[in-house]
Amino acid sequence: MNPRVFQAVVTVSACLLCAAGAFGQVTTGASAAPAALYPGQPAVVVTSGSVMVLTVHDDRGKPLDRQAVVQMTNKANQRVLARVTQEDSTAQIVDLQEGVYDLSVSAFGYLTSHEDVTLDGRISTTKLWEISLKRDPSTVDLGAVKSNEMSPKVRKNMLHGLAAIKSSRLDDAQKKLDAAYKDDPSNPEVNFLLGYLYFVKKDMERAQNYLLNAVKLEPRNAQVLTLLGRVQIQRKDFTAARGPLEQAVAADPESWMAHYLLADVYLTQKEFEKSQQQASLAIERGKGAASVAQLILGQALADLRRYPEAVQALQAFLTAIPTDPNAPKVRELITEVEKRESQAPADAGGSQTMSSVVVSEPMVAAADPGLLVKNWGPAGIDDSKPLVAQDVSCPQGKVLHLAGERVKELVDDLAKFDAIEDVYHEDVDQQGIPKRNVTLRFDYVASISEPKPGRFLVDEFRSGRSGAEDFPDQIATRGLPTLAFIFHPDMRDDFDMSCEGLGTWNEKATWLVHFQQREDKPHRIQDYIINGRVYPVSMKGRAWISADTFQIVRLESELVTPMKEIELLSQHQTVDYAPVQFPKDKTELWLPKSAELYFDFRKHRYFRRHTFNHFMLFSVETQEKRKEPKQAGKGPESMSPKSKHQKKHA
């Protein structure tokens, strides 16, 4: 198979799913370079202008536990200089000319601080500024841990427990979180995560106990209050649920889920006017995600005898969620409402309510509160948008340009290393429970060549038997580490891209960029090949781009629409990148560390994880080519040229 640049491929042959590497061709062209942001680097020598040095604190006066983005905007010419705080929560901005500046400091989970600063432009350090940020009550980061307020042991157990929850390893999560609770029972985050864990495990009594503790420790935490209300609804204790949900909407008026759950409580308690108001707020705040609230709204309007509006809301619910299990009962309710509307007002049913016409069970099970861990597979790209800092403008052009420059470095780096690749494969049933699993190990090498200017060829080589037929279920996944090439200057115009704001990943500030394949452009990133026929994949996804180095640290992607012609109903990929140190050469390369793939194909669900470790750096002599690992069997990989090279361990 001829390799084609920047393309991950899954291939199907002989009626079974298998894969082979294929990479598409692109032509390198010049890219306009806008003025770069200042990356987060050590202090530099200043030849002109003032220097701004500042420290960022939280609202308790302690150094901020996460990175913050500091921007100085010259009000006269709108020139923006930016830095990211370092580990000691300080930042330095240089070359500030005379003028009035808007100093803004932003961090995920905190309200953005704005302050006017007047500088005279003299070559000097202006001032050691101290900025205090206030927490944003509408943003609760499930993975944020206040490391400065707990012991390293508790923090470690919390992070491991959270990772286990996200991977649906609930027993492992319980062990880690129980250990954290034993060491720090008064920690509100430990209590919240344990309440969340037992909610997922459907042990509502224990979930309620931990969440009540968390509320005592953090009375205005909207996320804890909302989950507590939901747990109490599940326990049929609507009177108890009312209090925390009313507190939740007061603490976070933008939470559509809190409004929705409160509307359900009011409906159950026959307070129809309040139910209608809360359901309307849920729909307004949640937009498309809150379509389930149309059912509560329709029932409340029906009981208020606002029949035409009730029918409209109920039909909107059916349009948005046609496969809901309660759809037949909703249609019966519409018929009943239309019947009452056609009757004379005197015969309209008196004081009889209609709420019981639909279901006795509350409809919360139909909604996703943004907390639940799915039984199988991550939430969709557009179903669970990560939270971002408020009031922070994203310099999209600069972010995309600098990320593109880092990806060009990644192209070079991928051709410089060997690694041990572990592949873990699961066949999963429809309930998300693994039926069987297989683990494989390879010596892994990536090969990149440029046979003529502007044309790149990329391929991967694995030692041993690594043909498609040698992988579990004949699925050989290749090319996942190259997904970041979406941001290569010669590829990114194939996608619509938008910067969503300032977020966080692994406690580091990141810009979040959403991308989606343009249908009027070539589909060059991924193909499925079945019996020799190529099916290009239309992808969308999100990237987390470091706010100081502009490296892509994480990338997620999925299908724009199911590929019904090959019975591929879903596909979700994640790739994590990180720096790898090679001390002997004093070299650091930014390389893929892990990749995960979830896909639903021909009534089978599969999960696969690739991890890379034991990195070795190549030292290649002039005009020599890379050598792939020795092959134990024949296959496409065995056809590449061999040459001498040296390895140095990371």
Image (cartoon, rainbow, N blue to C red):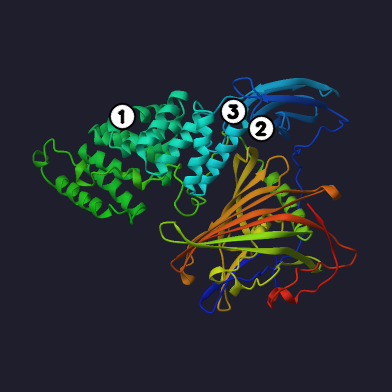
Q: Position of residue 565 (x, y in %)?
A: 47, 71
Q: Nearer the viewer, mark 1 or mark 3?
A: 3
Residue 646 appears in which quarter of the rendering?
bottom right
Kindly identify the residue that appears in the image at 69 percent across and 45 percent down: 399
Q: Position of residue 558 (x, y in %)?
A: 54, 57
**Towards the viewer: 497 or 99:** 497
* Pointers 1 and 3 in contact (C-beta within 8 Å): no
Q: Is residue 340 left or right of residue 1?
A: left
Q: Is residue 482 above or below residue 547?
A: below
Q: Position of residue 437 (x, y in %)?
A: 52, 62
Q: Which residue is most to the right?
A: 622
Q: Mark 3 Cα within 10 Å, few/some/many (few <14, many 20+)?
A: some
User: Label 1 vs label 2: CA separation?
Assistant: 39 Å
Residue 616 visible in rendering: yes
Q: Mark 1 Cα within 10 Å, few/some/many (few <14, many 20+)?
A: some
The residue where tag 3 is placed is 150
Q: Secondary structure at mark 3?
A: loop
Q: Is residue 317 above or below residue 282?
A: below
* Pointers 1 and 2 in contact (C-beta within 8 Å): no
Residue 4 appears in which quarter of the rendering?
bottom right
Q: Is residue 543 left or right of residue 125?
A: left
The residue where tag 2 is placed is 68
Residue 151 appears in which quarter of the rendering?
top right
Residue 292 visible in rendering: no
Q: Secondary structure at mark 2?
A: loop
Q: Is residue 545 above or below residue 470?
A: above
Kindly identify the residue that appears in the image at 43 percent across and 61 percent down: 429
The residue where tag 1 is placed is 240
Q: Secondary structure at mark 1?
A: helix
Q: Tell which circle, 2 or 3, labels the residue nearer the N-terminal end.
A: 2
* Pointers 2 and 3 in contact (C-beta within 8 Å): no
